[in-house]
């Protein structure tokens, strides 16, 4: 099984959102990850440790990235490191992933967010932060598409870092409605996404987000 997700800024209880003290935030994150991983030890082999921590407008220029200005980041700027280190310590057997959207390839946001996430996880690898892979959510719609070639290019970049890739939340919304043309495009995009994964030695998972498609 695949676990999603340990740390995310959205849909959190008010008491968690009100934490501003760095030590309290760290203790809360460590306790949560420890309890969850111990509970599911031996049942879940892959976890999205942190979800959507990079800012949507991050440009990725010159090897940089911009973090999302979330309440977690404001209280504890190194929360990603702490989350991954804690997860590895609690259960060394599970694979640890960073998961995000709009990082499919150069077609989406001109590749800026994809480059930002690449820079971000590259830095983690270089600093020895335990990370095994990147989850590409792959939320598209029929007027927001990515080509097979650009997906392959993006997956290869992560492979060069020694990281796995999984397509984690695949869905394609038909903004034009239920037309034959939209269904044909939807089928084409699904096929290209699956082909890109199957054609990539480091793509180890393909997860559909819902049943509607």
Image: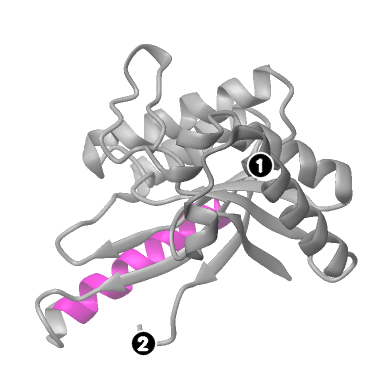
Q: Is residue 204 above or below residue 26?
A: below
- Residue depicted at 77% across the width and 63% down the height: 36
Quick check: 147 above or below 38? above
In the picture as drawn, the residue positioned furthest to the left comes out as 176
Q: Is residue 200 above or below residue 163?
A: below
Q: CA distance from mark 1 to mark 2?
A: 41 Å
**Which residue is located at x 15 percent, y 85 percent?**
180
Nearer the observer, 73 or 199: 73
Q: Check residue 212 in the rendering and tell me which mark sits there, or answer none.
A: 2
Does any portion of residue 8 appear in the rendered image?
Answer: no
Q: Is residue 16 in view?
A: yes
Range covered by the magenta-colored residues: 182-199
Q: Nearer the viewer, mark 1 or mark 2?
A: 1
- Secondary structure beneath dot 2 equals loop
* Residue 110 image point, x, y percent: 22, 35
Question: Considering the numbered disc 1 on the image, is that residue within a helix, a strand or a loop?
Answer: helix
Image position, residue 97 (x, y; %): 64, 47
Q: Which residue is mark 1?
A: 24
Q: Main secondary structure of the magenta part?
A: helix
- Look at 44% across and 44% down and name the residue there: 71
Neighbourhood count class around disc 1 (C-alpha, 10 Å): few under 14, some 14–19, many 20 upward: some
Q: Residue furthest top?
A: 62
Residue 54 occupies which quadrant of the picture? top left
Give how far across and how far down residue 152 sits, in percent: 44, 42
Marking on residue 87: none
Q: Quadrant of the N terminus?
A: bottom right
């Amino acid at each position: 099984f695949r676990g999603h997700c340990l740390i995310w800024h959205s849909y959190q209880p008010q008491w968690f959102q009100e934490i501003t003290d760095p030590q309290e935030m760290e203790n809360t994150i460590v306790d949560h990850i420890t309890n969850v991983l111990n509970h599911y030890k031996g049942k879940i082999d892959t976890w999205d440790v942190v979800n959507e921590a990079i800012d949507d407008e991050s440009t990725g220029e010159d090897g940089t990235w911009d973090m999302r200005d979330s309440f977690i980041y404001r209280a504890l700027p190194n929360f990603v490191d702490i989350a991954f280190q804690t997860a590895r310590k609690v259960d060394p057997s599970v694979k640890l992933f960073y998961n995000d959207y709009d990082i499919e390839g150069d077609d989406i946001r001109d590749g800026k967010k994809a480059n930002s996430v690449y820079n971000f996880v590259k830095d983690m690898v270089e600093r020895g932060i335990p990370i095994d892979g990147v989850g590409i959510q792959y939320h598209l719609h029929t007027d927001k598409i990515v080509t097979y070639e650009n997906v392959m290019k993006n997956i290869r970049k992560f492979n060069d870092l020694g990281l796995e890739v999984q397509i984690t939340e695949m869905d394609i919304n038909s903004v034009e409605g239920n037309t034959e043309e939209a269904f044909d495009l939807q089928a084409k995009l699904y096929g290209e996404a699956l082909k890109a994964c199957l054609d990539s030695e480091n793509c180890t998972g393909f997860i559909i987000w819902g049943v509607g498609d």
